[in-house]
């Protein structure tokens, strides 16, 4: 499968401009890249968060397809309800269309408050693609820490003070947690690698079951970055191996989709972001080294997992 | 028609089989569990085509119901107590989106302390959630009401979710004589379902759950309240229509020996039946006693209730849930407001009873009834609010 941008540019956009996301926001880019790959009837489920509030302010909408938002912790179960209705209507002979279902939620709604609903829905095997636009904190409410916030990162609830320097403890590996559900398809992606992301969406949308894509999302105010650096950071996250691009099929078959020609030092990624500003000071060198060591170890372990995985 | 010996839970599962909704999503909780288990059996045996979603929590149960109902499916669920509490935010989202979901709510006390037996603290806490609430006195009413619930919920003037409430264990688990209708008759009565604005309509995409700020939010809520008020007439009409096919007609308020009553007790659900026993006893002693039981609690049938009260002087209101700190429990507060608005001078006395499944004894009930009688004659001034059948020290 090859992504043909010329063809895609001719398609009617299912996610349109005019929304109120920040200039340069990665979530808008992700939503567009995902929706570009939709060719069948689709229903979108959107968890409470930036993407939801900025694209649905009544009486406007950025969505040219059916769309439902219900609450914060239940993006997966809400879309699973839509999917269950579709299956039932087919079984009753009241529906012929072959629908696809896509859920969008941030890391707050996915890693934390929505984890139970996500786990339940993918374990039950509903047909839907869950896209986590992961900006690594509760950005919609003003940059509070989440389970996806990296160690030592500033957030408004893990501020950098004299005693504590940003978030204590590490982020959880949600991609591995979803893969441990042994569902057909799990992947990590970045909007900086649009070709990879869109191919993954296409693969996921062909599955008659659950799939999950965890997408790193640069956040202009939350990361403290310039709008023009958004996609640059989406690439640097991958080229530093901070956010590797890989996929896991059926919880077993693991493939790294992109090996950086030269693995860049983490500071290349961190130094453009205010949330990590304190890590570049000499007094916090140890914290920076810890974070670099974590990235290195995770990358090594991922390579081992993929080398040793069943094909 | 079939006459069966069945529990209310079994009757609900059977009604669900007859209705054959598109989607059922539920999580087991005592005393509702049998409903889910029995219906799961019908699914496994292929007796219904329903998509049954055995979820990981009640929050997800109601989320599935919301998603499925918005998608255009006919949807049913069942829960109790903590399960309803866990659904809380989703109850408002179901009603706010005008989704005609039907729920069997098997009343059980709320924790803490944890308790599995009957009281109404679960559904009373949800009385402002925008769900229509109907309370059933016995298993026959549960079966009949459950079948009426879908046409009420789906009525074009209403389009709101309906909670069918019945007493945990007392009614849910007791075998009773129930007259059941044929499948054809049930299906004729409820009719087929065509959702008004389904998500699953590729030619007409729709948005459910947008962000609505101060410029439009209040109109949304006002329209929702108007739909709830329209349900008064719809519940009444459907209760009458049900009577024509079953011989059991339903109104908004059930009355017992109220025609010439001087004093009366008001109670929801199975307790109303217990109160009838005492009313008979007092009648034998020459006291003109009656019982009223609001069948519909949301929307509150104030007009029908005032009519049912007729010319009584004193009313005792029994509440199986407290409204801690309010000074009056929920049913009494609503009846009191109705009396006040109508300029009535019926005197009202409120007693909370039966929390956590505590038996309401006939003697407690009788002595309360008698104190009302003495209050009516000006011989006694009972406290306006208190508890029945509780240790006082």
Image: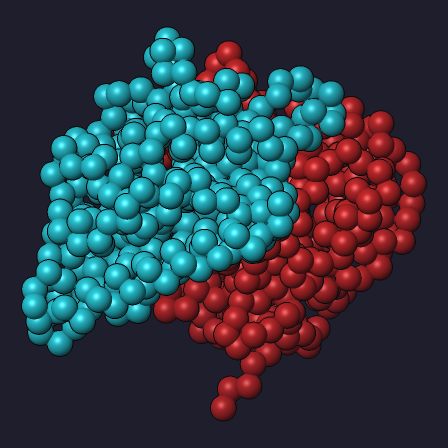
Chain colours: A cyan, B red
Residue at 30% x, 69% y is A169
Q: Seen in the image, is B156 located left or right of residue B206?
A: right
Residue B94 appears in the figure = no
In the displayed structure, A109 sits above or below A67; it is below
Corner quadrant of residue B24: top right
Nearer-the-camera pick, A174 or B184:
A174
Question: Vertically, is B343 above or below A27?
Answer: below
- In x, y percent, where is residue B86? 50, 57
Relative to B165, residue B284 above or below: below
Residue A103 vs A58, above or below: the answer is below
Towards the viewer: A126 or A277? A277
Residue A294: x and y in percent read 32, 63
Q: Residue at x 25, y 26 (%)?
A: A19
| Residue in the foreground of this view, choosing between A237 and B291 | A237
Q: Is residue A107 visible?
A: yes
The residue at the point 19 percent across, 32 percent down is A24
């Amino acid at each position: 499968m090859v992504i043909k941008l010329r063809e895609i540019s001719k398609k009617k956009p299912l996610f349109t401009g005019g929304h109120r996301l920040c200039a340069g926001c990665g979530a808008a880019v992700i939503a567009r890249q995902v929706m570009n790959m939709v060719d069948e009837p689709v229903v979108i489920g959107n968890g409470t968060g930036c993407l939801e509030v900025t694209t649905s302010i009544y009486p406007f909408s950025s969505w040219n397809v059916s769309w439902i938002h219900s609450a914060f912790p239940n993006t997966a179960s809400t879309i699973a309800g839509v999917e269950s209705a579709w299956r039932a209507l087919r079984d009753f002979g009241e529906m012929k269309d072959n629908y696809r279902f896509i859920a969008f939620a941030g890391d707050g709604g996915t890693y934390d408050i929505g984890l139970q609903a996500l786990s339940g829905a993918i374990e039950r095997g509903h047909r839907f693609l869950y896209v986590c636009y992961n900006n690594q904190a509760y950005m919609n409410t003003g940059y509070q820490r989440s389970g996806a916030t990296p160690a030592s990162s500033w957030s408004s609830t893990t501020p950098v003070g004299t005693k504590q320097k940003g978030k204590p403890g590490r982020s959880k590996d949600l991609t591995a947690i979803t893969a441990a559900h042994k569902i057909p398809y799990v992947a990590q992606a970045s909007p900086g690698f649009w070709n990879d992301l869109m191919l993954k969406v296409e693969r996921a949308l062909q599955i008659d079951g659950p799939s999950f894509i965890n997408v790193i999302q640069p956040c202009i105010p939350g990361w403290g970055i310039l709008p023009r650096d958004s996609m640059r950071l989406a690439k640097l996250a991958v080229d530093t191996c901070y956010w590797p691009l890989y996929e896991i099929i059926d919880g077993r078959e693991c493939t790294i989709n992109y090996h950086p020609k030269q693995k860049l030092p983490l500071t290349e990624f961190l130094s453009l972001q205010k949330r990590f500003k304190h890590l570049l000071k000499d007094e916090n060198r140890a914290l920076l080294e810890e974070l670099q060591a974590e990235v290195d170890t995770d990358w090594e372990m991922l390579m081992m997992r993929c080398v040793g995985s069943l094909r | 028609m079939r006459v069966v010996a069945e529990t209310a839970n079994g009757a609900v599962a059977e009604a669900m089989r007859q209705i054959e909704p598109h989607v059922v999503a539920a999580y087991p909780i005592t005393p509702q569990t049998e409903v889910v288990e029995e219906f799961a059996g019908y699914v496994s045996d292929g007796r219904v085509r329903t998509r049954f979603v055995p979820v990981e929590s009640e929050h997800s149960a109601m989320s599935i119901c919301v998603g499925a109902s918005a998608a255009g499916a006919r949807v049913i669920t069942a829960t109790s107590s903590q399960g309803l509490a866990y659904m809380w935010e989703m109850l408002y989202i179901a009603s706010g989106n005008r989704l005609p979901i039907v729920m069997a709510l098997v009343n059980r006390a709320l924790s803490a302390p944890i308790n599995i037996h009957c009281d109404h603290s679960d559904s009373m806490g949800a009385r402002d959630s925008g769900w229509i609430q109907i309370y059933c006195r016995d298993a026959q009413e549960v079966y009949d009401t459950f079948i009426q619930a879908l046409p009420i919920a789906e009525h074009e003037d209403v389009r709101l979710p309906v909670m069918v409430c019945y007493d945990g264990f007392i009614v849910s688990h007791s075998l009773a004589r129930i007259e059941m209708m044929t499948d054809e008759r049930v299906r004729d009565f409820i009719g087929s379902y065509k959702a008004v604005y389904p998500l699953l309509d590729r030619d007409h995409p729709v948005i459910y759950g947008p962000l609505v700020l101060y410029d439009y939010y209040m109109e949304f809520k006002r329209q929702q309240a108007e739909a709830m008020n329209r349900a008064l007439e719809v519940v009444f009409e459907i209760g009458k229509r049900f009577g024509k096919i079953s011989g059991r007609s339903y109104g908004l308020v059930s009355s017992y020996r109220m025609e010439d009553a001087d004093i009366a007790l008001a109670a929801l659900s199975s307790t109303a039946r217990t109160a009838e026993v005492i009313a008979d006893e007092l009648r034998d002693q020459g006291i003109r006693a009656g019982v009223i039981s609001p069948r519909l609690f949301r929307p509150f049938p104030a007009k029908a209730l005032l009519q049912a009260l007729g010319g009584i002087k004193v009313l005792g209101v029994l509440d199986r849930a407290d409204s801690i700190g309010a000074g009056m429990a929920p049913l009494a507060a609503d009846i009191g407001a109705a009396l006040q608005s109508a300029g009535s001078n019926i005197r009202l006395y409120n007693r909370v009873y039966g929390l956590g499944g505590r038996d309401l004894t006939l003697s407690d009930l009788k002595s309360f009834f008698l104190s009302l009688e003495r209050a009516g004659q000006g011989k006694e001034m009972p406290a306006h609010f208190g508890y029945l059948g509780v240790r006082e020290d």
